[in-house]
Amino acid sequence: MNRLLDLKKGNTLSEVQLNPVSRLDLIKYAGASGDFNPIHTIDKEATKAGLPGIIAHGMWTMGNLSKLFTPYLEEGFIQDYKIRFADMVFLDDVITLKAVLDEVHEDYLNFDVVALKDNGKAAIKGQVRFKVY
Amino acid sequence: MYKNVIGKKSQKVKNIVEMGMVKRFADSIGDSHPLFIDEEYGKKSRYKGNIAPPTFPRVFDYGEIEELHLPNVGLIHGEQTYHYKRPLLVGETIYCFTEVAEYYEKKASIGLLGFIVLKRYGEDEEGNTIFTENQTVIITEAVRKELVK
């Protein structure tokens, strides 16, 4: 594994492709986070809310995306993490997590981050400021 | 319609960054790194213990803002930001509260949208802010009409 500090502008972190989103993923996240909004787990509640089916918690996707930085948490930490929820994630969607180094400063690195759906649309996108120790 | 609640806060709630919760949370986002969940690994790290993933504060109780009445269905989570002074340490106590930071409206193709920004705070036992969080929730015109009924 490379050190984060060796990266240059435009370099990417190792991409991660998640397994197709399953109902169990969302049930587990509901239990672990305490977010039991039923549009994430129960079909009938999702359709009642006008959705074609259950959707992933936006925070589940945001939680997944941050793991690109986990291997580097002894070099620094995520000081700022800003996300816009752009598109809904449905069951069986395949999500790819990406981070590109956008700016290098003396004591922090700015990354553009995105979770892409298999249709090419961004489910969530934003920035990570990684503060270096 | 939410202008009158801007600045309203909840009472602080005591939360503990529990190892069991951190393990379950890390597993639920597929991020069971030993720095989060393995005690021995944590002790040898620069943190001298385990830390929690950056979105772990989703788990905390922030208390209720009495004056704020949000519908429990039909809300859209628009944006989410975290700002940290340092990572959360497993085992530490964090006092959390929430505040209505902003409310504004914007015209969109699907009608007038309301944006409510909830700011959340996590403080250590000495009252130092360890993290803040901004959650932007979008209220659609359809949902708002239901509320006024």
Image (cartoon, coloured by chain):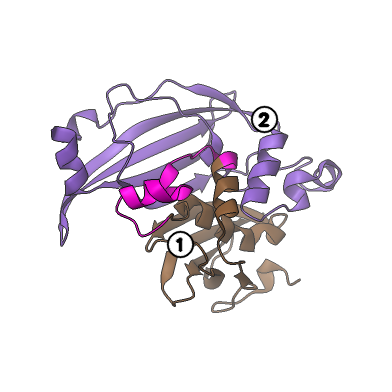
Q: Quadrant of residue B57?
A: top right
Tell me which amino acid carries mark 2.
Answer: Glu
Tell me which residue sits at (52%, 40%) in the image.
B58
If the image is split into quadrants, where does the N terminus of chain A sit? bottom right
The crowd level at tag 1 (other Cα within 10 Å; few <14, some 14-19, many 20+) is many
Residue under pointer 1: A90
Q: Position of residue A54 (x, y in %)?
A: 43, 54
How many discs appear? Answer: 2
Tell me which amino acid carries mark 1.
Answer: Phe
Camera-side residue of A51 and A59: A51
Q: Position of residue A47 (x, y in %)?
A: 34, 52
Stretch in magenta: A31-53
Q: Position of residue B54 (x, y in %)?
A: 58, 48
Q: Is residue A57 visible?
A: yes
Q: Position of residue B64 (x, y in %)?
A: 39, 25
Residue under pointer 2: B92
Residue B25 among those drawn in magenta: no
Chain given the colour brown: A
Subunit ID for the residue under disc 1:
A
- Apparent side of residue A121 relative to residue B139 in the rendered image (left or right): right
Furthest-front residue in this view: A44
- Apparent side of residue B140 relative to residue B96 in the rendered image (left or right): left
- Apparent side of residue B138 relative to residue B112 in the rendered image (left or right): right
Q: Is residue B52 visible?
A: no
